[in-house]
Amino acid sequence: MSSESNTLRHTPVMTILLHLLPGVLITATGGVAAYLLRDSGVPAYFVFEVSVLVIMAPVMLGIIRWGMRVEAKESVRAMLMRPVQRLKVWEYVVYPLVIVAFAGGVFTLLGDPVNSYFRDLIFPTLPAWADLTDVFTNPDAYAGFWPVVCWATGAVLISIAGPIMEEAYFRGYLLPRIPGSPFVVVAGGVVLFALYHVFSIWMVPVRIIALIPLVFLVWKTRSVT
């Protein structure tokens, strides 16, 4: 993948920092808030959803705007990787199907056993106030509306708004600025995005495998749409 002549490549340290910082801030903010609210009946998952809303988007947009000043570009759009030529219609159909099918297959086959193994290894005991899944696995411990609220909020923030922001930030902004060979760029984009999910660190091994087609195809096509 050739980069535009005025696209600044980050240093390795800056690349790592910019990938991990949003996840660290989301985890730290959400963790402190969840602990302070541990006796209030508010589920950890809802606290996490709010943290995504108030931390992720402002931090990622703030970093991109910082990059605009560094690279002397006038718009957020100018900072994002764009295809050299328009994708063919079949590519808009086939590539998303490949990405979704591969990731779905990986999580279906490996998700439960591998994630459970690493979660038990890293967090053999996890209090309810820190357990993102507790509101769904132990719903009787919460007011009846909380599972519905968490699901509905998650459908908007975690399933739609969050991924759009992540795609723009990680693939649109950071991926073309990772230094190194094509292999290093793709591998770095995969591993660092998986590690960004500090709040579910036990899922990193499965995420790394599941993300390979996504990051490779974005790198190959230079398209985040």
Image (cartoon, rainbow, N blue to C red):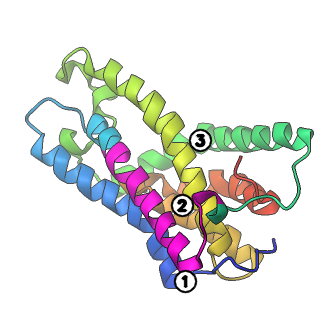
Residue 118 appears in the figure: no
Q: Which residue is mark 1?
A: 12
Q: Position of residue 148 (x, y in %)?
A: 34, 18
Q: Position of residue 146 (x, y in %)?
A: 26, 22
Q: Which residue is mark 2?
A: 193
The kind of secondary structure element at disc 2 is helix
- Label whose residue precedes the other's in the sequence (3 or 2): 3
Q: Quadrant of residue 96?
A: top right
Which residue lies most toward the left here?
A: 39
Residue at x 18% of width, y 31% of height: 42
Q: Nearer the viewer, residue 213 or 91?
A: 91
Relative side of 114 to 186, left or right: left
Which amino acid lies under the numbered mark 2 shown in the image of this protein?
A: Phe
Residue at x 18% of width, y 47% of height: 33
Residue 36 position (above or below residue 4): above
Q: Which residue is mark 3?
A: 107
Residue 57 position (above or below residue 190): above
